[in-house]
Image: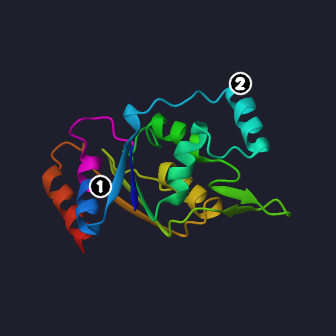
């Protein structure tokens, strides 16, 4: 099963358009998780105390861990997140806080090194940016570091279309060229 994590907030999102092209190309069953429609518990002291207690009790089936279990069980993962202010929409960070769970998505070795527990072998990160300034170490780099170092998803692919808001940019051509690369 493919897990499609949609962090796009605009109705006519260019990032979602590219992610949908990827889904069509993969031609596999998928579950779409629209983060804008999710209500995440605030990660505060009370939440952390509850989560820690549930982990100590081994209650991994608790609804608090539903997103983490879903992520860990996916065969492939697609994250669609536009490049905003050198990162991604805040809702994606909230989601990542929910899935980063010791005992479900990763565990620590006796040496304290994270060891991934996720089934997925590949994660696709789909994004668009208004300008051409796109330092990969920010939004994409953060997700790639988590995937490779915590979740054991070694194959992390970046799909991007940039320069979409530059005055006079051939937006439709840029998007079509990216879609063509995805299909190949």
Q: Tell me, yes or no, whether the highlighted magenta stretch contains residue 13.
A: yes
Q: Residue furthest bottom?
A: 184
Q: Is residue 90 depicted above or below 31 in this figure?
A: above
Q: State which quarter of the image contains the N terminus.
A: bottom left
- Specify whether residue 41 is in view: yes
- Specify the farthest residue to the right: 110
Residue 19 shows which numbered tag? 1
**Residue at 67% across, 29% down:** 47
Q: Is residue 177 left or right of residue 51?
A: left
Q: How many marks?
A: 2
Task: Using the image, tell me which numbered label, if any, was put on residue 79.
Answer: none
Magenta highlight range:
7-19
Residue 88 belongs to the span the image colors magenta: no
Q: Position of residue 149 (x, y in %)?
A: 64, 62
Upstream in the sequence, badge 2 or badge 1? 1
Which residue occupies the foreground of this view, 121 or 132?
Answer: 121
Q: Is residue 78 left or right of residue 11?
A: right
Q: Which residue is mark 2?
A: 46
Q: Secondary structure at mark 1?
A: helix
Q: Secondary structure at mark 2?
A: helix
Q: Nearer the viewer, residue 142 or 65?
A: 65
Q: How many angstroms separate mark 2 from mark 1 (CA)?
A: 36 Å
Percent coordinates x, y for residue 99 in the rendering = 58, 46
| Left or right of residue 67: residue 115 | right
Identify which residue is drawn at 37% across, 32% down: 37
């Amino acid at each position: 099963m493919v897990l499609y994590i949609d962090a796009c907030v605009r109705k006519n999102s260019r990032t979602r358009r590219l992610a949908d092209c990827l889904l069509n190309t993969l031609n596999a069953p998928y579950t779409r998780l629209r983060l804008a429609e999710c209500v995440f518990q605030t990660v505060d002291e009370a939440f952390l105390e509850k989560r820690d207690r549930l982990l100590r009790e081994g209650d991994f089936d608790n609804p608090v861990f539903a997103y983490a279990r879903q992520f860990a069980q996916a065969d492939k993962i697609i994250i669609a997140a536009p490049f905003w202010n050198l990162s991604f929409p805040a809702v994606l960070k909230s989601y990542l806080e929910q899935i980063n769970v010791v005992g479900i998505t990763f565990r620590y070795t006796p040496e304290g090194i994270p060891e991934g527990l996720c089934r997925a072998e590949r994660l696709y990160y789909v994004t668009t940016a208004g300008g051409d300034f796109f330092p990969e170490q920010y939004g994409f780099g953060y997700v790639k570091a988590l995937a490779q170092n915590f979740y054991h998803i070694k194959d992390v692919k970046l799909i991007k279309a940039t320069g979409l808001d530059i005055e006079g940019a051939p937006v439709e051509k840029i998007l079509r060229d990216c879609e063509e690369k995805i299909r190949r």
